[in-house]
Image (cartoon, helix red, strand yellow):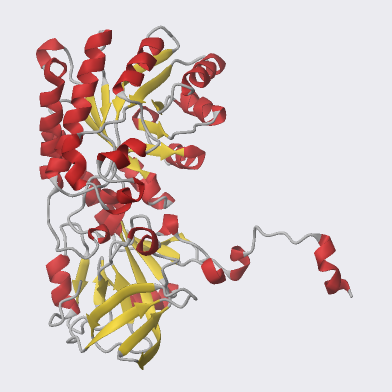
Amino acid sequence: MTDPAKTGAETLAGVKIFSDRLTVDAEGKLHIAGVAASELLERFGSPLVVGVEDTLLRNFDRIQEAFATAWPGPSAILYAIKSNNTLAFRHLLSRAGAGGDCFGLGELRATLDSGADPARIALNGSDKSPELILIAVMHGVTINIDDAEEIDMIADAAAQSGKRARVNLRLKILPEALGPYMGGSTQRHGQGIASAKRAKWGLSPASATEVATRLLQMPSIDLAGFSVHIGHLSNRPEAFAAIAAEFGAAVLEISTALGLRPRILDLGGGWAREREPEQRGAPVDRVTIETQATAAADALAFALGPLADPANGPLPELWLEPGRYISGNAQVLLATVGSVKEDCGYRWVNVDISTNDLMRIETGSFEYDILPASRMHDTPTASQEIVGSTCFRSVIGAGRNLPSLGRGDVLAVLDAGMYAEVFSTQFNSVPRPAAVLIGTGGEVEIMRVRETLVDVFASHRVPDRLRQHEKE
């Protein structure tokens, strides 16, 4: 991932994308939104997660504009809080007009409490509880039905709340054209379409038709439309077009059979960023969100046929559920170098973060860009193993060509805003780092406090009978 001849500043110039607020000063220090990384560590301690308000909002604005331009009808962006549940981020996005994609009560509560419009919140999940469904119905949240068993719970919730429940049907879409783009984690459950078929989510078009027929006979439930989400597979526009085309064809078939005109079509998430660690070290292929949006919207409109003809009535509102696209590069993880060891032809550079803080290295083979934040103009001198201090190998970056790092140097890991904090662990009883937010006015504020050893064990309880030795 690092060119042996490039300095940190040159590497940054090669991987930088439109919303990064990363610069380098004359002394070779990395600045994040105008603040030196080393200064942030001096003020708030190491390691440190650094969020950038401007980056977050620029990402949101761009994906919102991309789909507003590509789709001839209305559209809405529902932020997938699972990618990053930092409450400050969720509040910023709510103020900007983002809706929400939620799994479970915690995500739903956080999204509602942030001020997001309930009419633009989707509740997903394959095993929703009656309590969760009741809260969703009471607040006017749209429920993406994943199983026919949910219908009775939704009807009960409508009766209890006195409100009409709004629902979409989540479809299981299996386009053969998608096969070449399915790899990575999907391979664990089979090859290509077999993997998507085996996944627990969604209803086949035949099953969805049966469920829709039942829903149309229930006045307490409003069948607003349909949803689909296969997730991140590729950054190729052909992949998104394949999903949208198959989804549109299924929606047309069901709607024609039942005389429906859907008002909402939810294409889910998985939209690719121009630089992301899930590319697993492959060369950066800068496919823009505009290209993806156009490919998906055009394929969907074509497949919908008469349902996408304004002469036949208003076009459905297109919903999207992006997470990583919005939050991915909105956080940078800063670390400080500790012990450095050379032996057996290798150079191990220990830092005060670990794969505890970047678990997708372990679970998804992510490869992150790592910059020598305190020595951005220094010429690389050695291939180095960047490792954490846990008792696992904890390889954050293998064979990285960087300046000869020493104790006290600062490293910056890019794209730590997606599936990093939400996957983080306390393995080896290591407290998790603090997080700060750099605002658009340059202010730096805490948005997650640093854990302590007390926090690590705060939920543990030792039965009294095991404490007898303490009394002796």
- Residue 164 placement, left or right of 53: right
Residue drawn 24% across the image and 59% down it:
276
Residue drawn 20% across the image and 59% down it:
275
Image quadrant for the C terminus?
bottom right
- Camera-side residue of 175 and 87: 175
What is the quadrant of residue 439 in the picture? bottom left
Question: x, y percentage for residue 338?
Answer: 41, 85
- Camera-side residue of 270 and 160: 270
- Residue 55 placement, left or right of 66: right
Q: Where 34 falls versus 250 (above or below)?
A: below
Question: x, y percentage for residue 368?
Answer: 28, 66
Q: Where 360 falls versus 215 (above or below)?
A: below
Residue 372 appears in the rendering? no
- Camera-side residue of 294 and 455: 294
Residue drawn 31% across the image and 19% down it:
206
Residue drawn 32% across the image and 46% down it:
190
What is the quadrant of residue 280 in the picture? bottom left
Image quadrant for the N terminus?
bottom left
Residue 318 appears in the rendering? yes
Q: Where 67 falls versus 369 (above or below)?
A: above
